[in-house]
Image (cartoon, rainbow, N blue to C red):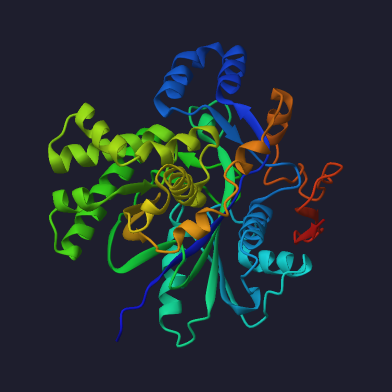
Amino acid sequence: MAHRSLGIGDIGVYVPAPEIGVETIVEERIRREPGIETQLRRAWETTGQKRMRYTEPWEDTSTLAAESAMALLRQNPGIDPSRLRYLAVGTETGVDHSKAVAAYVEGMLQRAGVPVPRTISTFQVQHACAGGALGAIGVAALLSLSDRREDTGLVLCSDVARYESATTAEITQGAGAAALLVENDPALVELDLSNMGFASEDVDDFFRPLGSAVAKVRGGYSIQCYNKSLELAFADHCERRGEKAEEVIADTDYFVLHVPFRNMALRAMRKLLSSRLALGEAEADAILAAKSFQEGIDPIANIGNTYTASIFLSLAFLLNAQFKLIGEGIVGKRMILASYGSGNTMAVISATVAPRAPEVLARWKSGSVWDRARLTPWEEYEDWTGRAGGVEHGGVSVREPAAGAEGFYLSRIREDGYREYGFR
């Protein structure tokens, strides 16, 4: 069988507008509970987070996913949605225990005039923050089995990360979505599905019990699990490539990781380089700087954790920054993508920037994520912490979008709990 190239044709990004500074959160929590000052300030310094985004009252995981899909379609007028064969959503903050977010998004897109066919497979992938990457791998594998090269898939990675208030985890919250066009002969990034590295272990580092709007996290332990699984999956990847770790590291131009908070990904890479190359922190940082690692993680400090979308937001920021710097020189750059999901699993994938990537990257409106940010007062943020997925207490009333707001919105929740969405 001839070699078949599969991967990501483009990435659409959506981050909600409401924004609050981490400093504001820290100062307000300390003012109310002085006893937590030391641990909060230490956490602020440790994470490297600066700001976070959160949802409007009419937004939830489904609307974020639909917005990212529309962003992708708008920057690709040549895409024929009627050729979509798969519509998958990776999320760990689903809105229904049975119905997939993908099914809700299918309906939203159709009501917005997008000709999504009924002859399509919709499904949801869940494994904490790795759900989006696993969804992309799955759709790419499915496309590889079809004789119809024109078939495409849309994988939406969407989440609203929420933790208990007045905890060290609170400052790493966030919300956002990334849409991936998965296709044959991809225009942006080619994925190598032949030698992926994996690691999994049954642990309780992070979870969200049924009925809970907020996640439960054992911070220090979760970091250990992340680092351990990265080491194991990377070693598995190297073994399957038939290369030594130092050869793979030297051969890699860019490392792209899941970023729960900025400094977690940085420290994980330092640890990996230290163990594989016997490097000190300064030497490891020099290698990471040469590989432009910070260009992918620095923006996350101003958004927060977006769970499944995090790795692809990081990928998009890195590719955009490098394209502005080296232009056509970005073609052929080799990458390692490492996607972590608590509970846990890690997937390490080799990827290459595709020949047509400059055409795709030239269409991106890179400033849109920052231009639409709306710095909010503490009272508005505190109101958000009292909501569950955009729904008022009682679970049946939903706030209308603000005057002039456009896009998808949660219009109502019926008495039986079913969600209905609108578009304007």
Where is residue 206 drawn, in percent x and y?
43, 44
Quadrant, the C terminus: bottom right
Residue at the spot 53% in from the left edge and 75% down from the top edge: 152
In the depicted structure, whether residue 318 falls above or below residue 408:
above
Residue at the spot 52% in from the left edge and 59% down from the top edge: 360
Residue 160 visible (yes or no)? no
The mark total stands at 0
Is 279 left, or right, of 214 in this rendering? left
Residue 409 visible (yes or no)? yes
Residue at the right extreme of this rendering: 403
Where is residue 35 drawn, in percent x and y?
51, 13
Residue at the spot 73% in from the left edge and 32% down from the top edge: 383
Which quadrant of the structure image shows residue 298? top left
Residue at the spot 77% in from the left edge and 65% down from the top edge: 112
Where is residue 319 drawn, in percent x and y?
44, 49
Where is residue 357 drawn, in percent x and y?
45, 59
